[in-house]
Amino acid sequence: MKAKVAVVSDIHANADALTVALKKIQSTGVDMTIVLGDVLTYGCQPVEVINKLKQYKKENAVVFIKGNHDQFYFDLQSGANHASYNLPKFVEESVSWTMKKICSLKLEEIFTWQDNYYIGDVYFSHANPFKYGDWSYIEDVKNLQKSFQVLCDKKVFSGVFGHSHRQIFIGNKDGGMHEMNEYRSTDDMDQLIVNTGSIGQPRGSGLGYVILEIEDNKLTKASFKKIKINFNKSISLIKRAGFSCETEAKLIEYLQE
């Protein structure tokens, strides 16, 4: 069995970027699309993103995995205690703004959400291979080593994550870590960690997603696909949203990297 899988993450209410990405994904003829969470916050097109994903799901096989920002809205809309989040001011302001825009939509009920997902020897979750609700980043050596051990315990070859907005391929061979531009089975790695980067808010490596090729339940290829959009519309929407000067500047700053 062969499967081509597209993996997108961290859309963050950027409908323009999502539209470009999904158009490219559909043109490659994938068998499944996995959305690694963080559908909303930061951007100012939350309803447009939800509607775009709903339409795409009608025509394509899609798996939705919960991210920390999705959980914010699940909790807020259900009235659960969320005081422990301790969000930065600009994030809290963006979440509150988004809540008003989606007040008639129950995000948790719109899609069927998973904590994580497996395809053969590949494990998918929003942030890392640890338990759900642990939103640790896995960019430093300590957390990378811990992640490789947890993936080993799960008896999988590869972990595919989002969360950091920064695309990475890290191979593990005999305990040594190797940065890679992409992965092919001929690279002879013992393990692999992939971060898809972000669709909606770049942090260092631009916008993009990942295409995986899986054969007989084994990952044979993983490659990063970049997309480019003009952020003028996104910036204009942020400026018109009525955010505080500090929040507006912070949200625009990400789009000007």
Image: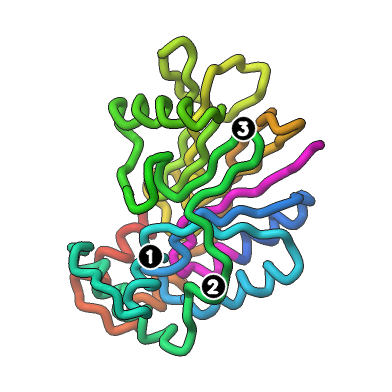
In magenta, the rendered stretch is 1-18
| Residue at the extreme bottom of the image, as rendered | 104
Where residue 92 sits: x, y (%)?
24, 71
**Within the image, what quadrant is residue 26 found in?**
bottom right
What's the distance in space between the residues labelled 3 and 1, CA to CA?
A: 27 Å
Question: Mark 1 or 2 closer to N-term?
Answer: 2
Q: Residue at x 46, y 35 (%)?
A: 168
Q: Is residue 67 left or right of residue 189?
A: left
Q: Which mark is residue 49?
A: 2
**Along the line of sight, which residue is nearer the eye, 78 or 241?**
78
Q: Which residue is mark 3?
A: 121
Question: Mark 3 or 2 closer to N-term?
Answer: 2
Q: Which mark is residue 71?
A: 1
Amino acid type shown at disc 2: Val
Secondary structure beneath label 1? helix
Amino acid type shown at disc 3: Asp
Is 10 contained in the magenta span?
Answer: yes
Is 144 contained in the magenta span?
Answer: no
Crowding near the residue tagged with mark 3, few <14, some 14–19, many ≥20 C-alpha atoms within 10 Å: some
Q: Residue at x 46, y 69 (%)?
A: 13
The nearer-to-camera label among 1 and 2 is 1
**Along the line of sight, which residue is nearer the eye, 40 or 77?**
77
Q: Is residue 49 left or right of residue 101?
A: right
Secondary structure beneath label 3? loop
Asked if the residue under mark 1 is in contact with the one under mark 3, i.e. CB atoms within 8 Å, the reply is: no
Where residue 132 sits: x, y (%)?
39, 51
What's the distance in space between the residues labelled 3 and 2, CA to CA?
A: 31 Å
Screen quadrant of the N terminus: top right
What's the distance in space between the residues labelled 1 and 2, CA to CA?
A: 17 Å
Amino acid type shown at disc 1: Gln
Q: Is residue 55 left or right of residue 251?
A: right
